[in-house]
Amino acid sequence: MNSKKTGKHFQQQGVDDMVMLPKVTEENMIENLKKRYMNDIIYTNIGPVLISVNPYKRLPIVDETWIDRYKGRFRHELDPHIYALAEETYRAMKGEKENQCVIISGESGAGKTEASKLVMKYISAVSGNSEGVDYVKHVILESNPLLEAFGNAKTLRNNNSSRFGKYFEIQFNEAGDPCGGSITNYLLEKSRVVYQTPGERSFHIFYQLLAGASNEEANTLQLYAPEHFFYLNQGGCFQVDGIDDIQEYKDTRNAMNIIGITPQEQDHVFRLVAAILHMGNLSFYEDGKGNAVIQEQQVLELAANMLNVEPFTLQNAILFRVINTGTQGGRQSTYNVPQNVEQASYARDAVAKAVYTRIFDWLIKKVNEALSKNKAPYRTVIGVLDIFGFEIFDRNGFEQFCINYVNEKLQQFFIELTLKAEQEEYNQEGIKWEPIKYFNNQIVCELMEGKRPPGIFSVLDDVCFTIHATSKGTDVKFLQKMQGSFSSNLHFRAFDVAFAVKHYAGEVTYEVDGFCDKNKDTLFNDLIEMMQCSTNRFLVALFPENTKDNSSRKRPTTAGFKIKTSCQQLMKTLSACTPHYVRCIKPNETKQPSRDAFTGMNVLRQLRYAGVFEAVTIRQTGFPFRLTHENFYKRYKSLVREENLDSNTKQWKKFCEIIISKMAQKKDMSAVQIGVTKVLYRAAQYREMELLRNVALSETITIIQAFNRGWNARSTYAVMNDIRQTLRSAMQSRDLNELEQAIKYHTDEAEFQIHPEFQQTIEMRDIVKEEVRIMGETRRLMGQLQGNVNPPESLRSQLQSLVEAAKAIDYSPPEVTEAIELYDEIMSRIHCRENLDAGVKENDEEKLREAISEAERLGFDMNDSLVRAAQAELERIEQENEILHEMRIALSLPVDGSEPDLSYQAPTLNQLIQITEEGEVILYEGAWEELEGCVTRAQEFDCKTAIGIRLVNTGNLVLHLRSAIGQDDWDQVESLLLENKLGDSPLLVKCVEIRAAHDQLILKAKKAEVQESLDAASAAFDANTLQLAVDKGAALRMEVEPYQELVHAIIATQQAIYDGLEQVEEEALIYACQLAEQIAYNLEDYYQAAELRDTLHSLSEEIDFNLDLMPDREYLQELNDRAVGIGMHTEPLAELTRICGLEDEPLAKEQLKSALRRNDKERVIE
């Protein structure tokens, strides 16, 4: 956001102030805003009005550095920004001691809430910071999370939409610092408590409570997921991108603490919030008489418990309406009239909305109490108005009518104080001015709020209190009365079920359905009395009405009356302030941060609603720049310094004429007008004037600066050169006092550090200081030690610190060197004693030998108990080594302690042991006894060295392995090896027998696995798998010849069966079955072969018999078909097939031959 004033810059990024546009048209204004939006420039001025386009993303333009950038700067000096407007507001309040207000308007999602936060953030940052002031600023900023939690919601247009309007007033003391404040709220959208449009949420606080409540709170308030609450699940939206309900619940709680809401009050508030949710789950059904009945008693009891009332009391208030008849002072009757489902639902929702509204009002009251805690008097105020912008939806109702009424009044205020005042000032100044016509919306305001003649609000109130019918009929009557009252008004039109008002921003059609009910805003007395029956005193205090007092004959106030009254009060408040305007604009309806999402028509509509086009026109056509005669002279007097104008005469207007005349010699000043009290001019002249002024100032300033810089440079050089010489002299002397004085001289007189002399002097000063300290400490310690090589620990520790310090700075004069040598000897003796003790405890031969040798070198008393203990332990270790020598031989380990060769190819070191290539251990006579004897002797001697313990453990393990292998107990072998980490335990010494046992164990496991595969494959007659197993067994040198023979037999059998089945020949099948039976082959193909074999045999016999018998054709044909069907191909079958193919007469001859051959007379006769 740097101010570059090139033409190219304007072309690419637009102008900062649209008053400066060459031609004011809607198209040019939209294009200018688009150019700036495409470059992430969201702020643009229209004269005094600031346009803010929502970027829908975080831009790095609002942090502390930006506050510092705009602090104390005039608005025209820097690019447009919300901070520039806030600075102008704060400066005017503080300098002119006048009340100010910032009016922020725009549609939902345009960024009004964020703009109001930034205004308050800026004012908080630039104002004072005493304890009382900090408290007020803290409350102002921290009340935001609380008000947003209870007053904001996710809508289709905005994820954090304010569903209420607020006027936040910050109060300032004489010094211009915040000392208090107050909040007034308008038009809370309480209908959102009970219903949301699909895709929207209710107020944030419901979701914060459900997500962030502790387990204890959730159990107490019976909380669960939002989709289970009717008041929350209608919108179908439960989570929102960019909103962390858990964290925001913590922020809400923190805000409550800051503004002084006690923990008990907080519990009451959230209990009522939970009560509203449970109330929403009350559902109804109709009984046989059309009356409402509560669906679930458990839900009723839960809701009643949250309200601290009896379930019967709540049920009676919801399901029955108390109606009083008769007149006051006369006979009266009271009836409990049952309600239908619709009426019961209305009563339920009315309770929920009333409780929530009064909680919200109570929170506003608590914030105001916190802001006025100090009760400090105030002089001026800055008000920030954040309210709904003008709204036109597809369907508009009572809510939109009220919102647009407030915006109509604000537009009227804007017109009167901005447009109208502009022209009036020109007339007062007596300058040449061509008036601009503008629309005065007073006629629209009168149409809506008028009293004589009555406006729409008055007609609506009159209908609500004179008509006692159903809501539908009341709304129709309201429409009829408007038609009669406003038919001649050019800004009103009536339709069948709606009416239209022509606002300053355009015509809006309002559907009358629900107008009267919403205007009445009735909460029946029986519902209030139900609330007053609660044992929760907090809830009772929210409903202080006296429902028994019927003495007042005043009409109850309506929603419309309240809105009209509060709006009029707001106008009165704003009129007492100097206004500053922020118009917030949405670049699109999809909340997309993309630069391509800028929708021109959408922006145009909003600019029309904001009434900014008239402002641009009047500012550009008029004179947007103006200064009083005195201020104009003070600003531009540098242009006429040679004129010697005497300001004591205060002839300001004359001076202005002289200045303008001087300017006119160089630039065109024809458009500058000198009024009665001010000089007025346009943007072009302003730029020319500033250019001339800057040139004049530069000429004067350059001369002064050049002289001043030369004198400063020479003076500084002289001082700094003297300081440098002083530093160098001090370093050469190495005198501590001289070094200190040189450093002090530099610190007191130098304007900047002289490198490297200053840093070198400091370093040398520190070193000399340390040398002096070390020398003094050395003399003291050496005097106390007197060469003692066994000093007390305190003196030794001091000597150690001294030596370390001397070495750190490489300081070694003779006295210090002597101290270092003494320290080295002391530490050597200490380490020697430590090694003697450690060698005994650790049974470490090498450490003992080195320590005893060092003790002799250092002149220890060899009769010292520690030395003697070390010598004794060394002798014991030597004896142990002799035993271990024998142990190594018995285990076939190198006697010198080197790493053993564990390969089976190398000859074993012990001749009584032999290892085969497969890892089998062969023990010759005496090997077992030799190892067992060594282990026994070692255990009796109680070996203590680390190697001794390991060798004994190894010997024991080898003895157990030999025993288990000898008994063929391989499970025990496995257990022993696993317990000792397969021989890799640090408590063992690796030896060839342990490795051999491990390899034998693995070999056994492999053979068992192969044997299992052999058996399984044999049982399954799986030749391929069996062959693989046979190959593995052969590799392991197993006896696998029988299995190899079985493989061949299986293959031969399967081939024979296949051939027999393929050829369909009885002899081949008989052979195949014989092979299968020899190896007990029992697979399915064997049974198929056997069955086919038997079938062929049976058919052959049957064919032979029938060829001899020659029965009827039908039987012969059937027999032939059966044989051919299974693939039989014998010669008898071929004969049978031939006979079946004969004609009847040849066949009869064959049958006759058969009968004669068999001497079958009956057959012959037949």
Image (spheres, rainbow, N blue to C red):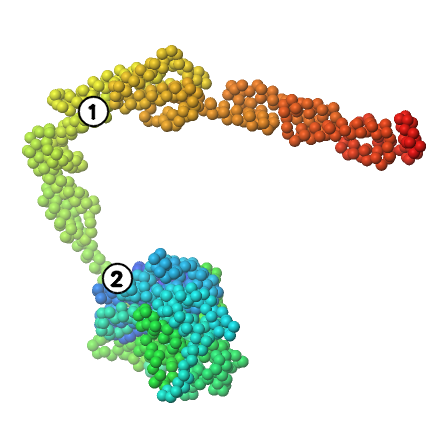
Tell me residue 244's x, y (percent): 38, 58
Residue 997 located left or right of residue 723: right
Q: Residue at x 32, y 64 (%)?
A: 267
Q: Residue at x 83, y 35 (%)?
A: 1115
Quadrant housing residue 440? bottom left
Secondary structure, mark 2, is: helix
Q: Amino acid at mark 2?
A: Thr
Q: Nearer the viewer, residue 877 or 656?
A: 877
Q: Nearer the viewer, residue 1062 or 838?
A: 1062
Q: Is residue 70 above or below residue 719?
A: below
Residue 772 located left or right of residue 75: left
- Packing grade of label 1 (10 A; few <14, some 14-19, many >=20) is many
* Quadrant the C terminus occupies: top right
Q: Nearer the viewer, residue 413 or 228?
A: 228
* Quadrant the N terminus occupies: bottom left
Q: Residue at x 41, y 16 (%)?
A: 921
Q: Which mark is residue 840?
A: 1
Q: Is residue 1099 above or below residue 41?
A: above
Q: Are marks 1 and 2 in contact (CB under 8 Å)?
A: no
Q: Amino acid at mark 1?
A: Val
Tell me residue 987's x, y (percent): 32, 26
Residue 704 visible here = yes
Q: Residue at x 15, y 34 (%)?
A: 800
Tell me residue 397's x, y (percent): 47, 75
Q: Nearer the viewer, residue 596 or 270?
A: 270
Instruction: Tell which circle, 1 or 2, labels the residue nearer the N-terminal end.
Output: 2
* Count of number-bearing discs: 2
Q: CA distance from mark 1 to mark 2?
A: 89 Å
Quadrant housing residue 188? bottom left
Q: Give the residue number, with chain letter if any, for mark 2.
A: 702
Tell me residue 70's x, y (percent): 31, 64
- Packing grade of label 2 (10 A; few <14, some 14-19, many >=20) is few
